[in-house]
Amino acid sequence: MDRNTQIITIFIFIISLVLIGGSFWYLDKTNLEAPEGNLLSLQQASEKAINYINQNILGDGVTASLLNAVEEGGVYKIQLKIADGEYSSYITKDGKYLFPEGYDLTIQPQSLEETLQEEITQTIPEREKPDVKLFVMSYCPFGLQAQKMFLSVYNLFQDKADMGVYFVNYIMHEKKEIDENLNQYCIQKEEKEKFYDYLNCFVKDGDTKGCLEEAKIDRVKLEDCIVKTDKEYNVYSQYEDRTAWLNGRFPKFDVHSTLNEKYGIGGSPTLVINDKEVEINSRSPEKFKEVLCQSFVSQPPECSQTLSDTAFSSGFGLEAGDNPSGGGCVQ
């Protein structure tokens, strides 16, 4: 992963954390100050917020830009763009405080227990042997987080459910994502019994070459499959032809386009169980297991086992995450 991508990934992670935590920043490091007893105009406040973010939070060529600003509820609401993401924040009219999120205090919030219970009681069609599809982009930080969650549950239910990793029909992380998507697609197609050994290795640090060796992948079969898949779906030719990119910004990856259209896949990660999209806001193995167990006609004994209730971190690595894990890579 190149440095700029790392920086963007880290910032998106921080933004997600702050959005959930409801924290705010005290803007005492920018040059634009409101006169004593006066308020800033909408334009002045917006500029101050953007300057603060660019000078104190971002760096190394990554910048925030202003999309829109309006007065709302006694504060200023600003829409900003960072890399491929758009965010809403609020700044007080005196320019002192920047809130990454606003909360409507007229709405009674759900408790954490109620939220988690809602997750596991979603109406999911039941089957004797559930079908589980996880759609990702191979370099999406949150897709990697979901894959780590998925692997823990797969190890327990691989003989009880049909579980597989599939790909969103566009990419957001340069050509390396196309290469890795094809690797994972073809390993599943040609040597499925080795795929999860490979994926368990890849999610640690993204060492494709080392993981191919560790999982003992047949390189001849892999290369032959990649060539055939590229020819069938015009993967690399669509990457070279920018006029074919989705919305003119994202190269297409059509290997699983039919399934993307069937399920209305919008981004990475998306989980589909028994043909229904399922939300798991806390991406821990235990919460995924609980949701999966709701999809069995008769729950197997494995459902009584307890897995980790802590989500993994986003991106590469097996560290525990310290956020509830609701982020994604979406155009």
Image: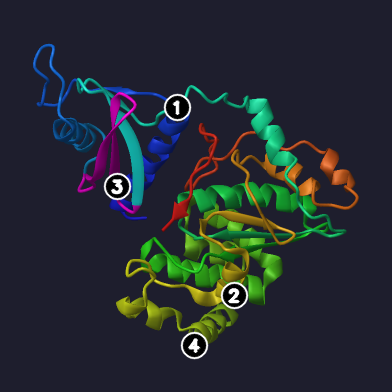
Where 255 sits versus 152, above or below?
A: below
Q: Earlier in the sequence, mark 2 or mark 1?
A: 1
Q: Please identify the dominant SS of the magenta region.
A: strand
Q: Which residue is mark 3?
A: 82
- Residue 255 appears left or right of 28: right
Q: Which percent across, then down, holds residue 133?
A: 66, 61
- Residue 21 appears left or right of 297: left
Q: Which residue is mark 2?
A: 258
Element at label 3 = strand
Q: Earlier in the sequence, mark 4 or mark 2?
A: 4
Please name the amino acid that badge 4 sits on.
Answer: Lys
Where 241 sits versus 11, above or below?
A: below
Element at label 4 = helix
Q: Which residue is mark 4?
A: 231
Residue at screen point 45% across, 57% down = 139
Magenta stretch?
60-84
Mark 2 or 1: in front is 1
In front of the other: 68 or 1: 68
